[in-house]
Amino acid sequence: MEFNKIISVTGKPGLFEILSQTKTGVIVKSITDGKRFPITATHNVSLLENIAIYTYEEEVPLAKVIKNIADKEDGKETISHKESSNKLVAYFSEVLPNFDEERVYASNIKKVIQWYNSLVKAGFDFSSLIEKEVVSEEEE
C-alpha cells in the first residue's frame, strides 16, 4: 500500500486505496474491510498526499504529521479520535508543536488521528513515509 494512492472520499467513512482508473472515475478498495467499488467524478475525493496542516510558519504535509505520530507511538495505535477536543488538541500539539490553532480545528485533528489509526489497523508501513518527506518548495 503506497501513501500516494490513499484517498478520503467525502460522505464515505474510512480511507481507500486506488486500484485502477476507469473512464468515469477510479476503482478503490476500502483499507478497513477490503471491499472494492467505483468512485465517480461526482464524488469529492482528497488524496492524502496532497493534504497539509497549517503551522505558523508553513504548511506541513500530512505524510510528515502521520510519520511524527507513528514515531511517537512506535507504529501502534494512538488515542481514540472520540476523545474530548481538549485531549485531541493537547495530543496534536505534542506531535506538531507549532500548528496554527486558529486554522486547524478539533474536527481536523480528529480526522487525522482517525486516519492514522485506520492506517495502523491496515498494516501500513510508516517507514515508507521517510522517502516522501522531501517537500518541494512552491514557486512564488
Image (cartoon, helix red, strand yellow):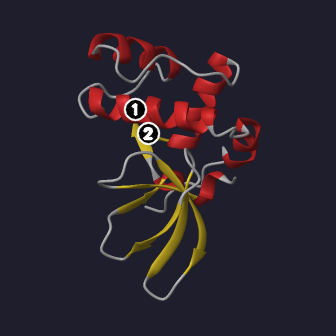
Residue of label 2: 58
How many C-alpha atoms fall within 10 Å of the one at disc 2: few (<14), some, or many (≥20)?
Answer: few
Q: Residues within 10 Å of mark 1 (few under 14, many from 20)?
A: some
Work out whether 76 lies above or below 121.
Answer: above
Spatial CA distance of label 1 from label 2 is 5 Å
Mark seen at residue 55: 1
**Amino acid type, residue under disc 2 in the picture:** Glu
Q: Residue at x 70, y 19 (%)?
A: 74
> Does residue 12 appear left or right of residue 138 in this picture?
left
Q: Name the residue type under label 1.
A: Thr
Foreground pick, 83 / 85: 83
Q: Are marks 1 and 2 in contact (CB under 8 Å)?
A: yes
SS assignment at label 2 = loop
**Which circle marks residue 131 in the picture?**
none
Q: Quadrant of residue 21?
A: bottom right
Q: Is residue 21 left or right of residue 54?
A: right
